[in-house]
Image: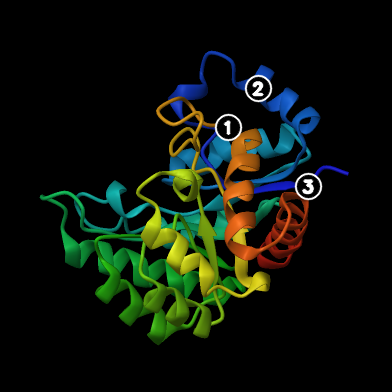
Amino acid sequence: MNKIFDTHAHYTDSAFDADRDALLASLPEKNVALVMQACTDLQDALAIQQLADKYDYLYASAGIHPENISEGIPEDAPDRLRVLAQHKKVRAIGEIGLDYHYEGYDRNAQIALFRMQLQLAKELSLPVIVHSRDATADCMEILREFRPEGVMHCFSGSAETAKEVIALGMYIGFTGVLTFKNAKKALRALEVIPKDKLVLETDCPYMAPVPYRGKRCDSSMIIHTAEAAAQVMGLDTEEVLRLTLENGRRLYHI
């Protein structure tokens, strides 16, 4: 039985344009059982759903990434998201959140967008996929208010923040960062996460683990992230893959 559940991937990214179908057709032969495709905007949601219709092991989310808001929230965004969320393979609202990494983004607009989508997820009884970069204080304040079901993806925070995320009932997702030489902060955070709240992801085509760092990532490479996690957790790699598969299924109600 295949054991890899990539809980966050971007197979609609242009990095896969040249060989998308060939790659996706090959992944089940490489121990990949399930993949959640993370959405970046309303147009991307439709492309994600088309792929999910084509490949049984692919699932979909619907949401607007914080970097994709420039002039306020489109008036029809909540209604369009509600429609998109009715697709049979949509299992989450995401990815949503806050990103203060680059100058020029309207933080107030990001916060309004985040809050709107968290409220929508509550209404639809769907988990959320949360993106937080250089915005921990604001992100955690809002999550404490809404207390959503969901996952903090590509976790880069401290062990203390990880404990707070877990206390809210959320899952935490790690990428290939666990394999990097400068991964001490991520590894310390991993140490405090209960086994039943850990999921693995690629964020592909980005964040490829060692020995593929700097190259295009795909879901099969999670094996290396699982190996790194296994060393910290005192488990074997197969057990990490098994438990993160179970956790991902529970997270996304699959």
Residue placed at 70% from the left, 64% from the top? 247
* In the image, farthest residue toward the top: 18
Which residue occupies the foreground of this view, 183 or 24? 183
Secondary structure at badge 1 equals loop
* The N terminus: image quadrant: top right
Spatial distance from mark 2 to mark 1, Cα to Cα? 9 Å
Q: Earlier in the sequence, mark 3 or mark 1?
A: 3
Q: Quadrant of residue 50?
A: top right
In this view, the residue in front, 191 or 88, is: 191
Tag 2 near tag 1, CB within 8 Å: yes
For the point 38% across and 78% down, the residue is 160
Cβ atoms under marks 3 and 1 closer than 8 Å: no
Label 3 is placed on what type of residue?
Lys
Point out the frontmost of discs 3 and 2.
3
| Lower sequence index among marks 3 and 2 | 3
Q: Secondary structure at mark 3?
A: loop
Q: Which mark is residue 23?
A: 2
Q: Is residue 50 left or right of residue 134?
A: right
> Relative to 159, does residue 101 appear above or below in the rendering?
above
Amino acid type of the residue tagged 2 in the rendering:
Leu
Q: Is residue 172 visible?
A: yes
Structural crowding at the residue carrying mark 1, measured as other residues with C-alpha within 10 Å and reported as few (<14), some (14–19) or many (≥20):
many
**Is residue 130 visible to us here?**
no
Mark 3 to mark 1 CA distance (whole Å):
15 Å
Residue at the limit of the structure toward the right, as seen here: 1
How much space separates mark 3 and mark 2, taking CA atoms?
18 Å
Q: Position of residue 128 (x, y in %)?
A: 52, 65
Q: Which residue is mark 3?
A: 3
| Residue identified by numbered label 1 | 218
Which of marks 1 and 2 precedes in the sequence? 2
Nearer to the camera, 54 or 216: 216
**Quadrant of the drawing holding the C terminus:** bottom right
